[in-house]
Amino acid sequence: MKKTNYIAKGFKVLSIAAVITVASCSLISFTVRSLGDDFLKQLGLTKPGAEEKIRQGILGGSLDTYGIKGIKNIAAGNRAAVASDILSYTKKYVSTADFIKNYNEMRDYYKPKFQKLQTPEEMRAEAVANQKKGIAQLEETIKKADAANKPIFEKVLISAKEDLKKVEDPNSKHNAAYAKNYEQAVKQNQQNYDRQIADWEAKYPSNHLLYVKKRLQEFLIETADIDFEAELITKNGKKYFVNRAYESKGNRWKMAFRAGKDVITTARTFTEKWMSEIK
C-alpha cells in the first residue's frame, strides 16, 4: 500500500478507543438489525461509507463523522443502546475479509525493510566507480575551461587521480578498516533487524484480533477513572470543569465524560466480554 494512503488520512496513534468514545458521543448507530438502506439514508451514508468510517476508527485512531447528517436526529434515542449497537457492528465487521485485508496491508506497510550491508568488494567497487565518474566530469570541465581557470581544475584533477589510487587499493586505511570490521557490522546489522521485526510483530500481530484486543485494552485504561459526577460551570457560553485538574485531561477522557456513565459503562462491559473471547 502506498505511503500516501495512510499519511493523507492522518493515521496517528492507533486506538479502538476512538471508535467507542467518539462514536458513542456522536451517537452513530451502525446496528446489525437496522443497517439497511433506509437507515443509512437517514444518516446520509452508504454501507461502504459507514464501514470505511469504522475501519478508519480502528486502524487510524479517529472516527471521521463528516457527512453524517443524521447524528442529531438519532441523539434523542437510547444512548446506551446505541453504544451497544456500535460495538456489536464493530465486533462483527472486524472479522470480515474487507477489514482483515486492510489490516494486513497496514501491517505489511509498517514491516521493517532489511538493509543489506555492502561487502568490502562491493563498497570499494562503488567508491571506485564514483571516483572515476568525478574524474571524467573534471576532464570535461577542463576541456571547456578558459585559460584563467584551467590550471585550477588541473590541480584538482591531479588530486582526484591520487584519491582514486587510494580507493582502488584494498589495503588503504579506509578499505582495510571496513574489511576488518565487516563481519561484526553484518552481525550487528542482523541483530538490529531482528529487534525491529520483533517489535513490529508485537505491535502488529499476524492475528488481527490480537491487534484489536490491544485497542480494547487501551479503551479500558482510558475510561477507568472518569468522574461522571464532576461539576461544570459555564463561562462565555462554554462549559468548564470546576475541578481544574480535569481541564488538563485528554480529549478521549473528556469525550467519555460527555458520553455519560450509561454509555461508557455499557461500552466497558461489552469490551471486557469481547476481550475475554479473543485468545
Image (cartoon, helix red, strand yellow):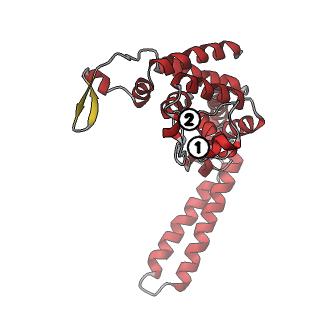
Q: Is residue 261 above or below residue 140?
A: above
Q: Residue at x 58, y 79 (%)?
A: 140
Residue 261 seen: yes
| Mark before the other along the chain sequence, 1 or 2 | 2
Distance CA(mark 1)–CA(mark 2): 8 Å
Q: Which residue is mark 2?
A: 28
- Please state the horizontal and vertical placement of residue 77, each as a whole percent of the image: 53, 29
- Please state the horizontal and vertical placement of residue 40, each as a whole percent of the image: 64, 43
Q: Front-most of 60 and 108? A: 60
- Please state the horizontal and vertical placement of residue 263, each as a whole percent of the image: 50, 21
Please say if the residues under marks 1 and 2 sit with CB atoms less than 8 Å apart.
Answer: yes
**Within 10 Å of the Cα at label 2, are there few (<14), some (14-19), or many (20+) other Cα atoms?**
many
Q: Which residue is mark 1?
A: 43
Image disc number at residue 51: none
Q: Is residue 53 above or below residue 239?
A: below
Looking at numbered disc 1 in the image, what kind of residue is underneath it? Answer: Leu
Residue 202 seen: no
Q: Residue at x 50, y 28 (%)?
A: 21
Q: Secondary structure at mark 2?
A: loop
